[in-house]
Image (tube, helix red, strand yellow):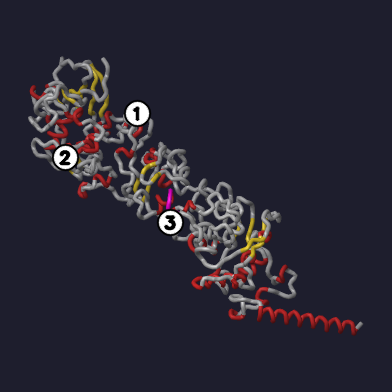
Amino acid sequence: MHRQAIGTTAFGGIVAATVLFVFISFNALALDPPHDDSNGYGCDTCHDAYSSNPKLMPSGDVPGPTIDDTIFNVRCWSCHNPIGDAPASSYKTHSSLQADDSYGEWTVGCWVCHSVHSQLQQGQDIDPADSEILGKLIRTTVDLGNITYADATPPKSGRKSVIFKRKTGPESFADGDAQYNGVCEVCHTETTHFRNDGTGIDQLHSNVGGAAGANCTAVCHPHDNGFIHGGGNTACETCHNSGSHTTHLSATNAIGPNVSCNSCHDVTNMPYFKSGPDGNGDGNIDLTETTVCDTCHSPDGSFDGVDGAAYGARTNWTNGVYTGNVLTAGKEKWCVSCHDLGTSEINGRQAPDVAGDNINYGYYVSGHGRVGAAQECSACHGLGMDHNFDGQQTYAGDLDNYKQGYRLSDVGGMDPLDIPLAKGNFGDYRPDAYKLCYSCHDEETLMSDTKSHGCYNDPGNPFKNAPAITTQFRNMHKEGHDTGDNDMPANFHADHLIDVGNTGIIWYSDGPGTLSGRSATTCPTCHNPHGDKKSDGSATLAMTAGAYEITHGSDATGDYGEVTSNAYDTSGDPQQRCVVTCHGLAAIRLLNGITIQPYQTALRFPTITAATRDRLIQVLPTKQISG
């Protein structure tokens, strides 16, 4: 028995010596850089001859709580971590935890793609310029059955050959040829791009201009983030150079705000977003959950700029709303999805309200988009012009930049509106100053006058001596104006564009209450083409400015429109638009007993203490009233 024990002990020693010899031989002959003696690594760095773990992994290596925490990955991470021996090679595993869990829980362990011991690609014709790829220890064959699934039922099987000669071009990560032997495509059976049988819906990644032969890990799918798309890389626009991403990211695209990836995304967890409720509890904020769109895109206005089917930012994210610099058919209301009463703030500046409440007033109710006019924003605005997302007021009279500030299109190669407009000389009529308005509104209809002169004996109107006044903004009775019998009837459009325009620069073109940007009178002096509202929330007459508070009424003499506020010319009022008004100077009071003919009305001015503004200027209404 003793001899038998001694023999057993001796035999054990022989076995141990043999194992040691094998390890020493393996160290010396079988390990390739970087896992070799040159870096201080040997078999016992990763293996324990006495361990009961698979492949003799050290006994101290135990699986963790997630599918990625296998004993093999744990061993790799003992060096490949931010503070380990290989901090520059701190990589996450390619798995459902980092990438996509729509196919279930899965993980591709390090050893599935990497041989660990040997440079198996050594025999390939490696491009000398890419010789460092030998340090990646890529296998020449990948067994798909080694991909781990949570339910232990691998849906993939088979062995795929891998050729990896260079980082870009032929025989790189995924070169797009029919061999499907790139290390980044041999496993893929469900992806949109680069499937291992060529059946991907967008096999060659044409949605980013084609990515065959690209260095997948350098730009879009970094290994240190588990190959997750994006991974926080700052060169996202390299591929994301079309559609909505271009609108947001491009520094040369004038349409968008030129934001960075981290304005919307959690760049430590790409492609997920930085804020919003985690509705499905997966720890990630996806496009359906995020609230990052809300600040800029006005979900709380009359046009839902986030989830509106035709114009919502989120619902139109994939395909975008532009074709070049033009809104795609059916997306015309994209502009008002921000320019409404909701919150749409970029760089601290709220988008001006254009759409209004879309019930009582607003562009599509009482502005140029209303029924009967039906003009979309692009009729006047150059959508490809700089959108001025700088947080500053975009137009300033001192800069003389009305066209750029309001993104107005040229008309026949000429500036659309001349604002601020200089004081004219006597007799001047300057139709080129109103080119944009005249591109739709008939000039002769607006300016025709039956007299040979205007209200101030101004002969500058080219449409004088007309058989009739065809504008509805006119005065029909001498009692309604201060210049006597010879001026009746009078075309008040001609009066305001020629006579008043040559009188002085009385309009603050920088906006109500600014007291700056003084200009001669022009179309926007009195009109808001988007449709304004009065203080009661109702639409104004003929797109006139709300500050005039023009109301409809009827009395014994007929129907009329009445100016009921003097805010437009009251010093210090936030709605002040004009330096002075001419109407308080009227000396003729409307006498009783004057008969107003059908379709005529009166433009009234309120009585002001110590002033004479209780005057009636009789004009035709902007809409005909039968009777």
- Depth check: give the residue in front, 166 or 179: 179
Q: For the residues carrying marks 3 and 1, which lies nearer the camera in this image?
A: 3
Circle 2 residue: 520
In this view of the protein, can residue 386 be seen by the observer? yes
Residue type, mark 2 in image = Ala
Q: Which residues are magenta?
A: 238-243
Q: State the mark number for residue 371.
A: 1
Residue type, mark 3 in image = Glu
Residue type, mark 1 in image = Val
Q: State the mark number for residue 587.
A: none
Horizontal placement of 236 versus 596: left or right?
right
The x, y position of residue 119, in whole percent, is: 61, 72
Q: Earlier in the sequence, mark 3 or mark 1?
A: 3
> CA gap, disc 2 to disc 1?
31 Å
In this view, 541 is above or below 355: above
Horizontal placement of 315 versus 187: left or right?
left
Horizontal placement of 242 versus 349: left or right?
right
- Which residue sits at x=54%, y=62%? 173
Circle 3 residue: 237
Q: For the residues carrying marks 2 and 1, which lies nearer the camera in this image?
A: 1
Q: Earlier in the sequence, mark 2 or mark 3?
A: 3
> CA gap, disc 2 to disc 3?
47 Å
- Depth check: give the residue in front, 509 or 408: 408
The x, y position of residue 10, in whole percent, is: 83, 84
On whether residue 259 falls in the magenta region, the answer is no
Q: Badge 1 local density, few (<14 within 10 Å), some, or many (20+)?
A: few
Query: Secondary structure under badge 2?
Result: loop
- Which residue sits at x=63%, y=59%? 107
